[in-house]
Image (spheres, rainbow, N blue to C red):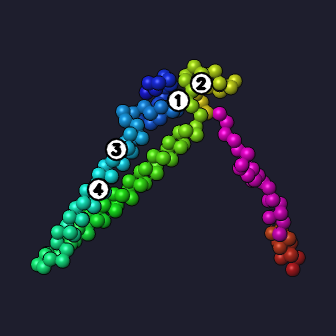
Amino acid sequence: MFCNHCGASDQNEQAYCKRCGKWLGASAPEQRMIVMAVFSAVSTVFGAASAIALFSTFLGTRGVPPAVYVAATFCTIISVHQMISLFFTLGLLQRLKQGRSQDQPAVSGRQADQHVRPGQQAGALGAADQSAFIAPLSVSESTTELLEPAARVARRENSS
């Protein structure tokens, strides 16, 4: 698949473009998260209103089946769950916006090709910064030190 914005090839249909960072699918995840936040808010309000209506109508009256109080309790629990879901969704949206604002602005196809280093393909990622990693040890490092005690033990057994 090709990107509709910059024309880069070999793209996934429901993902961000590897070159320009634009969403390639029908609706972006940000839009779906906003819809999810709205439904969570509506569910929170309806659940809380149902619980308040049940408790205020039947609280303190005689002959009320216990199922009414159980239903009101479940409405309260659902309302709290939806409120927590709403706060998580709003937090994710805020982190997503902060991450997008901290990134450098997306570069168009021609501009991206101008910043390509010699020997690097257009749109390809540069080399990773490995300065924070510890250099791997050699396979043959310290093998002599590890094998010496075994050789000495074998000599002692032969001499006895």
Q: In the rendered image, which residue does mark 4 sit on? A: 45
Q: Nearer the viewer, residue 54 or 146?
A: 54
Q: Which residue is mark 3?
A: 35
Q: Residues within 10 Å of mark 4 (few under 14, many from 20)?
A: some
Question: Badge 2 is on which residue?
Answer: 112
Circles 3 and 2: CB distance less than 8 Å? Answer: no
Q: Position of residue 24 (x, y in %)?
A: 42, 31
Calculate the distance from the C-alpha at mark 4 to the C-alpha at mark 1.
40 Å
C-alpha separation, residue under disc 3 versus residue under disc 1: 25 Å
Q: Are marks 2 and 1 in contact (CB under 8 Å)?
A: yes
The residue depicted at 48 percent of the width and 22 percent of the height is: 7
- Quote the CA–CA distance across marks 2 and 4: 48 Å
Labels 3, 2: front one = 3
Residue 3 at x, y percent in the picture: 46, 26
Q: Which mark is residue 20?
A: 1
Q: Secondary structure at mark 4?
A: helix
